[in-house]
Image: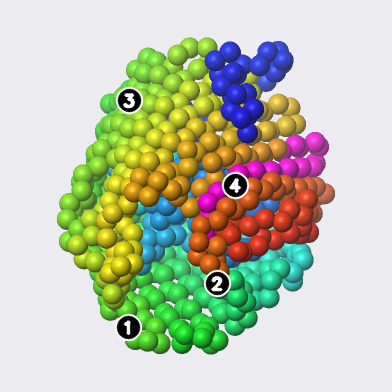
Amino acid sequence: MRHALFFVAAGILGGGIPALAQTSVPTFEDTVVVTAALEADDRDDVPSSTTVVDAEEIEARQIHTLDQAISTVPGLFVAQAGSPGQQTSLFTRGTESEQTLLLWNGIPLNDPYFGGANWQFVPVDGVERVEVVRGPFSALYGSAAVGGVVQVLTGAEQGGAASFEAGENDYLRGGLAAGYDFGHAGNIRLDVTGHVRRGDGQLPNEFFDSEELVARSLWTLRPGTSLGLMVRANDSDTGIPLSGGAFTPNSRISWEERELAVPFKTEIGDRWEVEAQLSRTQFDSSYRNPDDPFGFVASDTESEGLRGRAVATWRAGDDLWVAFGSEAERLEVTSGSNFGPDLDAADQRTWAVFGQASYGHGPVHLEAGVRHDDNDVYGEKTSFRGGAVVDLGASVRARASYGESFRAPSLGELFFPGSGNTSLQPETGESYEVGIEREADGLRLSLTGFENRLRNLIDLDFSVFRNINVGRARIRGLEAEVGIERGLFDVRLNGTYLDTAENEDTGLPLLRRPERSANLVLTARPGDWTLNLTGRYVGERDDVDPITFVRAINSSYTRFDLGARYRALAWLAPYARLENVADEEYTEVLGFPSPGRTWVGGVAVDF
């Protein structure tokens, strides 16, 4: 890990690696990203650390869910309590799991009940790319964007592609992505994606079944103007094999997620562009455990989010653009158990205005943004963000940014019987980031340092069993990455050092944040073959024993996955993968063993 950090720093400051620079190869193509600004921008002009996991990498790694796709991004740690489908947390630069905003085509997927996102239930069938922006982005998106933003962007498929695979533990999965142009001169676009999954885990009652269907249409009303409709339905059913270290053979939880959105976009002349979207999200969950010794055998929750967002952008040539907009949101939760109701249509409303400006001339690119949120429960909050990118010459760029963020108290934290507290204030954060990057001759090297300071963290005071604003944390870290595109090979190696998110009130490290971690993604494409090796190293970290509930150390682990795909015909490609090649025994969450060595085989068909 330390060698990886030194390797990156030496390459940047020393002008690269001569042995690699001797061969003439294409440079990395510019990547346009949409999550880090109110207007699409080149990744090279974004002051914040941004990683894009594109469709090619998703296919090469043979991954099907969002948590797998982002598990190799620097600064991120994914912790899953057992096999696929089990409860999954994401820690972005040491922040809490509910402090990262998840977007699906611009629609927030964080649950209004307690603020978290179901990272394990978001598939990547038909996904064009996943953008991961690290650092606070409340100046653009409001609440929850404390550690960063993860956005899933679906793409257009001309024709269709289907996959069918099977593996150990009665695993079966079928996926589909298809798209066609209709109407006069192809002015109506329709895309459909979906999957069906069945499978057991390696423990009794560790099954994970899921289905999803996504439909997206786009009507081009005239050149530069379009109106769309997006619909998503996802159902997941998961067994819960363990609770407090004891087996629970009949415990299960079911989730239903529904998203509906109407996006609109128009260009006015050569300088103006307006984008707007109305959306509705619904999350329903149902928990059942007929064997619970304390009588808690059933609970049901219904969450709803209604949102409207509009952004207008004015461009003054290639050097300057200014964007401004407004957003309105209404969240509502109803929940109850066999003991009685918990929340009865509890709701909160937020109205926000925001703006951002971007200016680039010569070697300097500057960005600044501000947002003001007005909420009917916690009041008002204003967030700022600014940053700069400077071209230093010799293919070297320096970046620096500052951002403010907040996470609004969730409806569960505000109104849950007993522990709820309507006087809660938003959690707040400030973050600084500086980095340097060199990119030339198929070689990219970067080194980034950051510091987060979090205040007013919401904790449960066990003496009165009530949520209060008391927590504080300081997080510092380094991220380093090397990327090489050379002939048949595409290699990415990154490492993260985290000054383990010290809790300033207790002096103890925050839980489940490794001090050191590293990732390797290596893809080779000889002829009709696509070969992939993915490796993850996670250092030891503090956790909680699930039986005694006292602090304990969770051991480090290293895991490798192998994948191979062969293009047998223009329309047919069989493939296979071996997960956890070395059969490593480890736990991402203490007390919940992760799967051992697992074989999967399948076939992909284009039509």
Say which residue appears at 27% left-offset and 56% top-offset.
469
In space, the residues marked 4 and 1 are separated at their CA atoms by 41 Å
Sequence-wise first label, 3 or 2:
2
Residue at mark 2: 244
Mark 1 or 3, nearer chain start: 1
- Give, as a three-letter code, the residue at label 2: Gly
Classify mark 3: helix, strand or loop. strand
* x 40%, y 87%: residue: 338
Residue 571 in view, yes or no: no
Quarter assignment of residue 398? top left
502 on left or right of 412: right
Give the mark nearer the N terminus: 4 vs 2.
2
Q: Which residues are magenta?
A: 523-544
Can residue 434 be seen in this snapshot?
yes
Q: Give the residue displayed 39% in from the left and 15% down from the top.
A: 363
Label 1 sits on residue? 341
Q: Which residue is mark 4?
A: 540
User: For residue 552, what is the image quadrant?
Assistant: bottom right
User: What is the C-alpha distance between the residues marked 4 and 2?
Assistant: 22 Å
Instruction: Give the quadrant of residue 274.
Output: top left
The residue wearing badge 3 is: 366
Which is the main secondary structure of the residues drawn in magenta? strand
Give the distance between the C-alpha atoms of the residues marked 3 and 4, in whole angstroms: 39 Å
Amino acid at dot 1 = Pro
The kind of residue on which mark 3 rests is Leu
Which of the image's four quarters has the C terminus?
Answer: bottom right
Above/below status of 249 relative to 412: below
The verdict on residue 22 being magenta is no
> In the picture shown, does residue 499 fall above or below 235?
above
Instruction: Out of 442 and 504, give the one closest to the viewer.
Output: 504
Q: Secondary structure at mark 1?
A: strand
Residue 78 percent location from the top left of the image: 55, 52
